[in-house]
Image (cartoon, grey):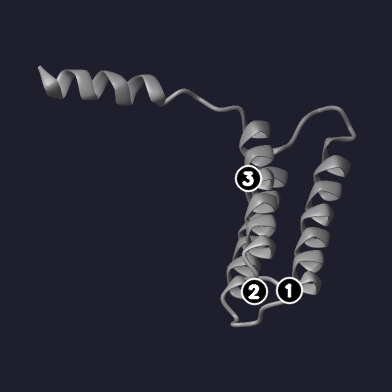
Amino acid sequence: MMFRTAAAVLASSLVAVPAWAQIDNRQQTQFHRIVQGWQSDELTGHEAASLVRQQAGIARTEARMRADGGGLSPAERARLHLRQDRASVSIYARKHNDRTR
């Protein structure tokens, strides 16, 4: 009985999320990681500003891709995910480089 309840809860949480929401959520998460790193002194002001510029560049690229009104193609979505992967690595590396403000 308990297994069925757990399975039902899990199944109800597996709702399809639109691709645009995944990209927007990821961008928001990255920005929050940058802010948290700056507030906790893991990032210097220069590092935080650089990472925010990187996120802004990704947002501009996404806006240009969406400008045609047709949404994102799978290739465009993959390109944005790759850029966010690289940005995530940059955030991690800068938060853990032992530099503080």
Query: In this view of the protein, which residue sits in the foreground, 85 or 73?
Result: 85
Give the residue at mark 1. 44
Which quadrant would residue 14 be assigned to in this image?
Answer: top left
Q: Locate the N terminus and report the quarter of the image it occupies.
A: top left
Which quadrant would residue 47 be assigned to in this image?
Answer: bottom right
Give the residue at mark 3. 26
Q: Name the element at disc 3.
A: helix
Which quadrant would residue 10 be assigned to in this image?
Answer: top left
Query: In this view of the protein, which residue sits in the foreground, 66 or 14?
Result: 14
Q: Name the element at disc 2.
A: helix
Q: Mark 3 and mark 2 in contact (Cβ < 8 Å)? A: no
Which comes before the other along the chain, label 1 or label 3? 3
Q: Amino acid at mark 2?
A: Arg
Q: Name the element at disc 1.
A: loop
Q: Locate the C terminus and report the quarter of the image it occupies.
A: bottom right
Q: Is residue 71 above or below residue 84?
A: above
Query: In this view of the protein, which residue sits in the foreground, 44 or 73?
Result: 44
Which of the two marks, 2 or 3, is nearer to us in this view? 2
Q: Amino acid at mark 3?
A: Arg
Q: Is residue 78 above or below residue 14?
A: below
Tell me residue 18's x, y (percent).
Answer: 61, 27
Which comes before the other along the chain, label 2 or label 3? 3
Give the residue at mark 2. 94
Which of the two marks, 1 or 3, is nearer to us in this view? 1
Q: Residue at x 50, y 25 (%)?
A: 16
Tell me residue 68's x, y (percent).
Answer: 89, 32
Q: Amino acid at mark 1?
A: Thr
